Image (tube, coloured by chain):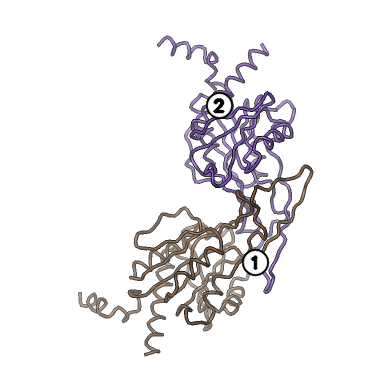
Chain colours: A brown, B purple
Amino acid sequence: AIADAIERILPGLHGASLAGRHVLITAGPTYEPIDPVRYIANRSSGKQGHALARVAKDMGAKVTLVSGPTNLPDMPGVTTIKVETATDMLDAALAALPVDVAICAAAVADWRAAHQAAQKLKKEDGQTGLNLALARNPDILATLAAPGARRPTLVIGFAAETETIITHAQAKLSRKGADWIVANDVSPDTGIMGGDHTEVHLVSATGVEDWPAMGKDEMAAKLLARAAEALHAMQLAAE
Amino acid sequence: AIADAIERILPGLHGASLAGRHVLITAGPTYEPIDPVRYIANRSSGKQGHALARVAKDMGAKVTLVSGPTNLPDMPGVTTIKVETATDMLDAALAALPVDVAICAAAVADWRAAHQAAQKLKKEDGQTGLNLALARNPDILATLAAPGARRPTLVIGFAAETETIITHAQAKLSRKGADWIVANDVSPDTGIMGGDHTEVHLVSATGVEDWPAMGKDEMAAKLLARAAEALHAMQLAAE
């Protein structure tokens, strides 16, 4: 009971509270339309991002969740903004600023159709090939992590890779300007994409931590506890 | 009660029974992989195809449902084969033959990635454009409708269009060799794709019928009653 009281009075003491913090989380896939019925998608289920939002809310944060299309239920107490494309996801994320922590867990499409057709594309008789012209999508993580007055105190990205996981994640960390990259292997045989478990590596400027396999809820709690500690340490350092 | 007894004894009398018939239905979208995590999809929910399977089973048919990825529950009494790609859907449909009626309600992707990458595609720094090479998928409707000993007695296709609906459907009827084409307008503002209602035109060699807007279940019942009548008439003509 005394420990509980201390926790209530000094939430920063053990670093595990996010009371008074605003946390922005992106989640799920994006859908990039080719024409009115076809689109490019990816196999993200949104489970990791939604787990992060739920845990952040339970830790006392104000939570804004910007989610691509998923089959997951809405969460009471979490402001959820539903989007389809990377462009709409970026707009919604920027509109949520300022925030203390931004966690980019969405599997944002790198590419969209360069020209979205207003009518369903027809195939010609005998046409055996087609080149679909793609254009680069905006980079949400890099945009949020760019220096500036509205940059979140802590910017965390995810790297879903299928090979040379750590090397790719370290390159992503410096290229995007993020503080941490949560890297994982989404090869189909791992069952991570769409599944309930994950196995990640936390990559930062100070090194790489290999976390054991765990549930996505447990990973969310561990990552957000680390984020709360980091925010608290930065606040102490600034005082 | 006498009417009921006649219906039991002479199911063909009113044409609304499919007892003793084998009905093959394709449903849903197909997913065409680009790499281990990305794919091309379309906005088909599978609701129309699943409604057809449920009604056909209720009318006494043996039903094989070949379904692309959907969020719909499995149906007891319907043999359901789950597939992702157009190629797998064709293989499963051919394996289900012989059947009396084939209804191709799936929104099969016309195109797949010409080269499916074994690893997640990486983007290069500064790369602003990309051409995705696409190859034609097999044509499931045309394959099932092609003349031959295993051709179903009745082959019904769907045409999901966003403009000049009837013209496109009539062209599809002759090009594919189908007996009937069920044509509808899937422009996003109709709410048909993904919704519970539909508004179709039944296109055959003898003309075009405009059906009123109705639920997808009701449309399934009306279409299958027509199919049962047609099978019965063809059987009488052959005797």
Q: Residue furthest top?
A: B2
Q: Which mark is residue A136?
A: 1
* Residue at the (53%, 67%) spot, across then down: A90
- Does residue A116 lie above or below A167 as drawn? above
Number of the front mark, 1 or 2: 1
Chain that bears disc 2? B
State left or right for residue A19 relative to residue A40.
left
Q: What x and y, as percent, mark residue A7?
A: 27, 77
User: Do the residues at pointers 1 and 2 share their chain?
Assistant: no
Residue A213 or residue A185, whichever sits in front: A185
Q: Which mark is residue B169?
A: none
Residue A110 or residue B193, whichever sits in front: B193
The amino acid at mark 1 is Arg
Q: What x and y, as percent, mark residue A191?
A: 53, 58
The amino acid at mark 2 is Leu
- Does residue A43 lie above or below B209 as drawn? below
How many numbered marks, from 0 up?
A: 2
Crowdedness near tag 1: few (<14), some (14–19) or many (≥20) residues, C-alpha within 10 Å: some
Q: What x and y, as percent, mark residue B106?
A: 60, 40
Residue A11 or residue A74, whichever sits in front: A74
State left or right for residue B73 relative to residue B110.
left
Q: Which residue is mark 2?
A: B224
Q: Element type at marker 2?
A: helix
Quote the CA–CA distance across marks 1 and 2. Answer: 46 Å
Q: Residue furthest right?
A: A126
The quadrant in which the C terminus of chain B is found is: top right
Chain that bears disc 1? A
* Residue at the (44%, 64%) spot, across then down: A65
Q: What x and y, as percent, mark residue B191?
A: 52, 44
